[in-house]
Image (tube, rainbow, N blue to C red):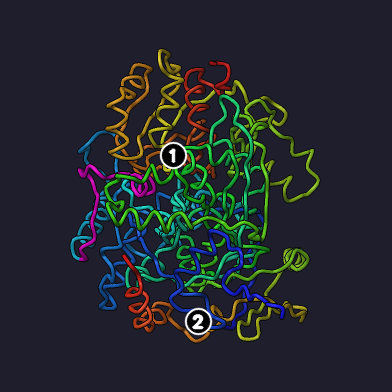
Amino acid sequence: MNFTSRIVPLPNENVDTDQIIPARYLKTTSKEGLGKALFADWRYDSQGNPRPDFILNRAEMAGARVLLAGDNFGCGSSREHAPWALADYGFKAIISTSFADIFKNNALKNGLLPIVVDKEVHARLLRHSGEVAIDLETQTLTLEDGASIHFAIDPFSKKCLLEGIDELGYLLALTTQITNYEQGLSD
Amino acid sequence: MDFVWYRIGMEAKTLFDKIWDKHIVAAEPGCPSVLYIDLHLIHEVTSPQAFQGLRARGLRVRRPDRTVATMDHIIPTVSPGFPIVDPVARRMLAELEANCKESGIPLFGIGDPRQGIVHVIGPELGLTQPGKTIVCGDSHTSTHGALGALAFGIGTSEVEHVLATQCLLQHKPKTFEVRVEGRLQPGVAAKDIILALIARLGVAGGTGHVFEFAGSTIRGLDIDDRLTICNMSIEGGARAGTIAADDTAFQYLAGKPFAPTGAAWDAALEKWQELHTDEGAVFDKRFELEAASLEPMISYGTNPGMTAPVTARIPDPDSISDPAQKNALAKALAYMGFIPGGPLLGHPVDVVFIGSCTNGRLADLRAAAGVLKGRKVSPKVRTLVVPGSQKVKSEAEAEGLDKIFLAAGAEWRNPGCSMCLAMNGDEIAPGQYCVSTSNRNFEGRQGKGGRTLLASPLTAAASAILGAIADVRRFY
């Protein structure tokens, strides 16, 4: 996972899953095509036209794959439709000072990389316009001026993302242990 | 000779540790633990893609006998048998029905007397039990922790994992004791306890942790009230919320349809009595709340941390120094149409919603009915009362609560998630103010442009009568 993109700044704190994808868009039996609904109530006006003042609608943000979000991004619901919408829209990584637990878990399961940085780095990225290069293998963010920032990620998630390991496959391989556990239960 | 006693395995453990340790199937170094799931609850919104995933891989549901399904989020609440107009909603419900039939999963769907909001039916059916690991594709799964279970919300991919293997990969969360002591004042409800906690800790205060609620106030609450508190653990950012089971919990569970009986009950009870935090156990974080100092609460902003006593004034962004927080408050107040410094009390409201997995149980309806009895809701307010399950509905009707609500001019509806998240046509219009006994006041949650005011059933009932944000204590 190694790519370069400009950053889309959305510095609001506590962006919740109802903003990321409103509940009415959860009426679907598919994972596909949810990018249209991403930030729907901020992105479109009541007629369904793109609001010119919303950051994603700005011409220079087209094709951007990295979102710079405020603290506690993704709080609220467990709806996996939130990372599905972000990924379908085209985002590959989200940078924030913190993520809500369930959202972070869901994002990792969909190849959407949640990157945690500290306040200083976050402020620096907010001031930085232009592109950032993200390399999961080396766990680095590289800015246009060459500055390199290290980010943490738990080793298991990193391995799964880099090697395309499917978590369900990992669990299925433990069938014997699961059966042993079940047999040890008294109920 | 001196004896050195090695206290291996005898160290003081928290309730969470006890449940966690008993459910580890595998734990390889550098990997999250594999946790066995005792009970998997499913509903129509977060399961279709999971079952599709299973079929695509040629997998079967491993333990249909540990899985229970209901229909709650998108179903109409107008009346029993009301048609579902939305074709996508119809398809989702049909898929759930087909998936359950194919896998042998019991489905308490439309028309079934056991149907209701998933986090209402689990406890009332006795499916939720102390010491169980319980998951559901819904963040308010934390509710079930009120009966001493370890219960948390999962995403659809994880729903697929649990269907296929009855297991989940989980990093072990930390522990957070919330101790509540003292007596609640009249007019102050369990809902106000959890709202006050989140106001103090913030919506990320519990991130990475599991709450354990303890203390004399908690011990004095009935199960419906404990469920309310655990329900909103997720709004404080916590992974789950637990309350150790005690005699109140055991009495609640005795005789419930899926609770053990006879010798099995005796054996279970013996185990359950061990499921509490040991004396001297160490929590990663702790917080204390004095119940007697709490007041009825109401939210003024756009996340569950933005709440205040009903008697408070709307906060002023100018009084906040941190620019991000100042900005966030200003934005929230602009969305809500609130003027800083103005009173909350007396602000007109358009809709009152009493229901949801937070406050849709019999005790909640009794509380609201107690305020509404012999009174009428304001003619300017649409008041919706939605019982959390068919069982709650019948019990409420047996007590005549429905007649009280109808006589007051409120609507008495059929069970479902309803206006909590407005997926089924029960919604508020742009700009409308709704005092709601639900759990989230995010922008647009109850309808695009809608303005949610989170509160207890007591405050909601009082507000319906006055047609404005009200202090229920004036009715005492």
**Lateral position of residue B270 relative to residue B474, left or right:** left
Residue B192 location, x and y as percent? 57, 35
**Would you name the residue on which mark 2 appears?**
A160
Depth check, mark 1 against mark 2: the one in front is 1
Residue furthest toward the top? B374
Q: How far from the left and from the top, in percent, is residue B342? A: 69, 26
Q: Position of residue B30 (x, y in %)?
A: 57, 82
**Is B57 situated above or below B40?**
below
Relative to B175, B81 lies left or right: left
Can you give x and y, in whole percent of width and height, for residue B7 in the image?
62, 72
* Residue B283 showing in the rendered view: no
Name the mark on residue B345. none
Check chain identity for marks 1 and 2: say if they share one.
no
Q: Secondary structure at mark 2?
A: helix
- Asked if the residues shown at circle 1 and circle 2 are in contact, with their CB atoms under 8 angstroms apart, the answer is no
Residue at position x 49%, y 87% in the image: A163
Residue at screen point 28% across, 34% down? B78
- Can you name the residue that lies furthest to the front here? B1
Residue type at mark 1: give it. Answer: Asp
Q: Within the magenta stretch, is there residue B115? A: yes
Residue type, numbered disc 2: Cys
B110 in relation to B311, above or below: below
Span colored in magenta: B103-124
Q: Which residue is mark 1?
A: B224
Q: CA distance from mark 1 to mark 2?
A: 41 Å
Q: Count neighbours of disc 2 (C-alpha within 10 A) and say few if under 14, some if 14 to 19, many if 20 or more.
A: some
The answer to whether residue B252 of the structure is visible from this angle is yes
Q: Looking at the image, is B375 positioned above or below residue A114?
A: above
From the viewer's side, name the closer residue of A176 and A25: A176
Chain letter behind tag 1: B
| B71 with respect to A43 (left or right) | left
Callout 1 crowding tier (Cα within 10 Å): few <14, some 14–19, many ≥20: many
